[in-house]
Amino acid sequence: MSLEIKNLHARIAGNGTEILRGLTLTIEKGKVHAIMGPNGSGKSTLSKVLGGHPDYEITDGDVLLDGASILGMEPDERSRAGLFLAFQYPMEIPGVSNANFIRAALQARMPEGEELEATDYYAQLYEKMDMLEMDRKFTARSVNEGFSGGEKKRNEILQMLMLKPKYAILDETDSGLDIDALRVVSKGVNSQRGAERGFLVITHYQRLLDYIVPDEVSVLVGGRIAMSGSKALALELEAKGYDWIKEDAAEPACA
Amino acid sequence: MSTEILETPASPATQFDIDRTAGNFSYPEQHEFDAGTGLSHATIDYISNVKGEPDWIREFRHKALDVFLSKPMPTHWASHDLDNIIFNKIRYYLANAQKPTRSWDEVPDDVKRTFERLGIPEQERRFLAGVEAQFDSEAVYSNIKAAVADQGVIFCGSTEGLIKHPEIFKKWFGKVIPTGDNKFSALNSAVFSGGSFIYVPPGVKVKHPLQAYFRINAENFGQFERTLIIADEGSEVMYMEGCTAPKFETTTLHSAVVELVAMKGAKLQYVTVQNWSANVFNLVTKRAIAHEEAEVKWIDCNIGSRLTMKYPGVVLKGRKARGEVISIALAGDGQHQDTGAKMIHAADETTSNIVSKSISIGKGRATYRGLVHIPKHLKGCKNNTECDALLINAGSRTDTYPAITVRGTGNACQHEASVSRISAEQIFYMRQRGLSEAQAMSLSVNGFVNDLVRQFPMEYSVELKRLIDLEMEGSVG
Amino acid sequence: MNAVVEASERGAQIPECPTVMTESPDFASRPAYFRGRQQAAWERFQSLPMPARTDEAWRFADVKALDLSPYRAAGAVSDAQQAVLLARSRGLGETAGRMVFANDRLLSHEVLADDMRAKGVIWLPLEQALVEQRDLIERHFMSGDSLLGSAKFAALHEAHVKAGSFLHVPRGVEVALPIEVFHWLSGDGAAVFPHTLIVADECSKVTVVDSFAGASDGPGFACGVNDIVVGNGASVTYVAIQRWSEKTLAFHLNNTSVARDATALALRLNLGGARVRDEAASHLRGQGGRSDMLSVSAAAGAQIFDQRTLQIHEQPDTASDLLYKNALNDRARTIFTGLIRVEPVAHKTDAYQKVRNLILSNEAEANSAPGLEIEADDVRCTHGATSGTLEEDEMFYLQSRGIPRWEAQQLITFGFLSEVFDRLPCASLRDHLTDLLHEKLG
């Protein structure tokens, strides 16, 4: 069981600029796969493309979730199929309380006519919030509105804990986090590691990987995987930067 | 007599009728009293004769008709759609009887069934202190709970009010909104029928709301109810009105006048959920006078109609009086919700607050017009106005036209307005959590009006949310 | 009661001049192509009705005060007065050029900066431009409709206009220093029709400062038009300093056209005049275009400043930002009616509109009507209006430091208004406006 990305080519819709240029990668259930790469290498595009963002169009390749292609699916269908995206910049939704939002997302996963049981729901929600050291007041506040950077990222992880996806993509979840928030967020992620779930952790810096220790590390350059290895590769990148990989890459990155 | 129901497919009757489709059914017409088509002084005599009114009101009506005829359509600022109202093709009075019953059992079957489908008797049992149900020109049912009536509260129709309680009625009738205030207040003054007369004695606090339900059943018809509510010193009352009509091909006119008087220290709330069908011109004049330390709050929700023009106002006449307008407008495809508020500060330390939120869908158009007037030599007056518009589709339109006059130091006025849309990124975020596009849209829209919906009575706010869900399902894809 | 005396005095003073209302202006001295246009404008002026109380464009205004019958086309000023006015025509320190008019007659035309002529900048008195720059005049002279209520007065201006400045900055040219133009009005009952036309071609840049001032305290009439055409990628800063006598009835009518990636920044400083009607319309006509509309008004006595604005977004991805600030003293009245209009095609519009009134007297009155008409959904539009008085806490704070109350009020008022000047890019200009504001606030 895995999330398989095969020779994926994607470009900005209507503009033609190709961002992903034959990306191939497999995220196995039970594993944490980290993707690193310099700015502009296509890291964030990858997460949006997997989520089905309308700004991008796929020109070639496929993405298989446990063997079935998701490319023809709407963003919400992909979500309900088990794909979760922790956004780099989570959106604010004025007037919609956090509790109602997560509840609506859970309700959307239930068969027609079945209602979410409120007491269980709140019990679960509070338990996860406690783990993430989130104040209870965040249930009544509008989704992400007026949240600090760290609060937003915790809220992303809270949603992940509640929705229990098969595959979770964490897009630069460490950006904008201080060390305490990073520790808490990582604790939340690590609590979800296990045989029934695969993770793709996108990051620019190695430091997140000290907390969420990956099983495999791949380097994205110019829209494709330039190199893969173990956790040691991340440390090497930290020490040497990305330039040596760029030079080694078979084709020069587009100008 | 035929009881065959003429209806278009509608969802099952809901508890509270603010679903657009739930009001879309009608019964065959049969009226004992019909003033005929068109408007003349003879129409007025017919109405006055049928109602058995005193001479002063007959004269009042005749004078009002002259004022109506002399006034031009306000199309130099208002929508030219007004020109599509053909006054001589409208029927001005249709009724079976002039006296409402006090029991639903005595209401004619098909009329009763209409109100049952709209859930009115059910609501009355559950949470209302009194109900008046108007069918075309006259109320067919009017009842007030004995416990409330025993406190001296009067709740009846306008005709009964002016005949039985002239000492209270005459003092305020036409004083808050003079006949010549605008063309449509003059029209109402000429041909008014139905509506409520309420008097709450000093110190009496009516715990549960009083409700009126206005139903238009006939085609080519004009409904002109007239409501006068007087909350005497220190009293409290909440009044709610709902309205529906079946969807006819021809235009229907609804032109009400509502006058509120809040005496010293009184608290008066007036809640409207307007859900006329899309062939109704809804041109309503609503104004309140708030005396010393009185509070008047208009909660106004406009969902239906073809064109609504309505700007509830408060004349803040006594020191420390407070006025508020909370307004939600939903302009669907082909609709124009032209709503707003007027706050006239006429005493020191008066405060007013206007919060207006509108949503334009498809080619719908929502317009806010506001007037805030703080003339000279007043101290400590405050107004705060917030207008937010949400545009759903590329062809949606919104306008904001406030007018604010402040004279002198010691007063403060603040107006803010914004226009926004639901961003594609916001929708993507929600869809990534598994919500469909329509769910994401309605969640956003509900979020947009959430702080205002909370001010509605519970029973209404649940339905409002459901209605928004329905509207959003139609607006995507 | 002494209307007869006044009228005869006025008549005695300027007997040779026809009244602007009833007698046709002298078209004979203009080039033929322009003469026809002026004749048509004169007919238009006569046929258009005077504004009525019920006109939406004249809401809040006292239309009865618009009687033009006392005013006559201004006569020439004496040689002695010319010298005085020339000496007073100094605003900014360094300028690229200076033009001075008194009673619609050119007194001086100095081109001071080398980059003006060398780079092909054309900067001429209007009378000369009518003859020498026919193409540009025909293309741009009052080419926009009068949309804000004063079509009749725009026609009056067009019929009577003879003085003013015409500026054409060619492609890519930047005029580093500001250009300064003075218009003086002298003599009781005199009328002037100052005109400003700025045409900035692609990627050019220029700053123009118009100073309108009364040479005496008497009544007068000014009916001016200032039009600005900003080409692709060009940048124009325009400042109008209005210091007419406090008995002057004045109109200042503007159309600004902003092309692709162009920026227009206009600031109006209103200090003088009895009744001033100020209309400004910015047309955003190309993607990336931006218009900043600023105004500072210090109203006192019985002054009435009546300002009407339009921000019209005709193309996608355009921005406009309006900030009008008024301080009102004595029996002064201000009127602000503004509209942001977003056309159906104008997605990605970013429009902002704010009017703030500081009311300093119990008899002063501020009217605000900020409007929005939005027909595109992907926009960011906000507007706001505030009317209030001095914060007592703020006053107390200053007084607790030993500053007398009147001075504290002045300081706060000055701070409230002068903040707008910070939006101007040029320091010497900011300083000049600051000085003038100080002078008015005393």
Image (tube, grey):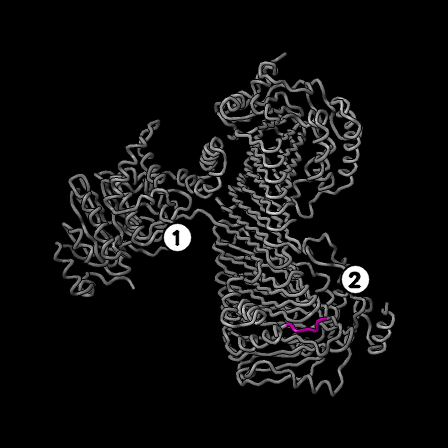
Q: Which residues are magenta?
A: C242-246
Query: Which residue does the numbered mark 2 point to in the structure image?
Result: C46
Q: Residues within 10 Å of mark 2 (few under 14, many from 20)?
A: some
- Secondary structure of the residue carrying numbered label 1: loop
Q: Residue at x 53, y 26 (%)?
A: B128
**The C terminus of chain C - image quarter:** bottom right
Q: Residue at x 77, y 28 (%)?
A: B44
Query: What amino acid type is highlighted by mark number 2?
Result: Gln
Locate residue C376, reporting x and y percent.
51, 50
- Eyeballing the image, is C340 above or below C85? above
Query: Which chain is disc 1 placed on?
Result: A
- Mark 1 and mark 2: Cα distance apart in space: 55 Å
Residues under numbered marks 1 and 2 in contact, where contact means CB atoms less than 8 Å apart: no
Locate residue B471, reporting x and y percent.
48, 36
- Secondary structure of the residue carrying numbered label 2: helix
Q: Is residue B459 left or right of residue C388?
A: left
Q: Is residue B475 left or right of residue A142?
A: right
The image quadrant that residue A79 belongs to is top left
Q: Nearer the viewer, residue C192 or C196?
A: C192
Locate residue B319, reporting x and y percent.
62, 47
The image quadrant that residue A83 belongs to is top left
Q: Residue at x 51, y 48 (%)?
A: B388
Magenta segment's dominant SS is loop
Q: Residue at x 54, y 57 (%)?
A: C313
Q: Nearer the viewer, residue A184 or C291?
A: A184
Q: Is residue C240 left or right of residue B451?
A: right
Whether residue A59 is visible here, answered yes or no, is no
Query: Which chain is disc 2 placed on?
Result: C
Query: What amino acid type is highlighted by mark number 1?
Result: Gly
Query: Which residue does the numbered mark 1 point to in the structure image?
Result: A14
Judge depth for marks 1 and 2 and give the one in front: 2
Using the rendered image, report if marks 1 and 2 lie on a common chain: no
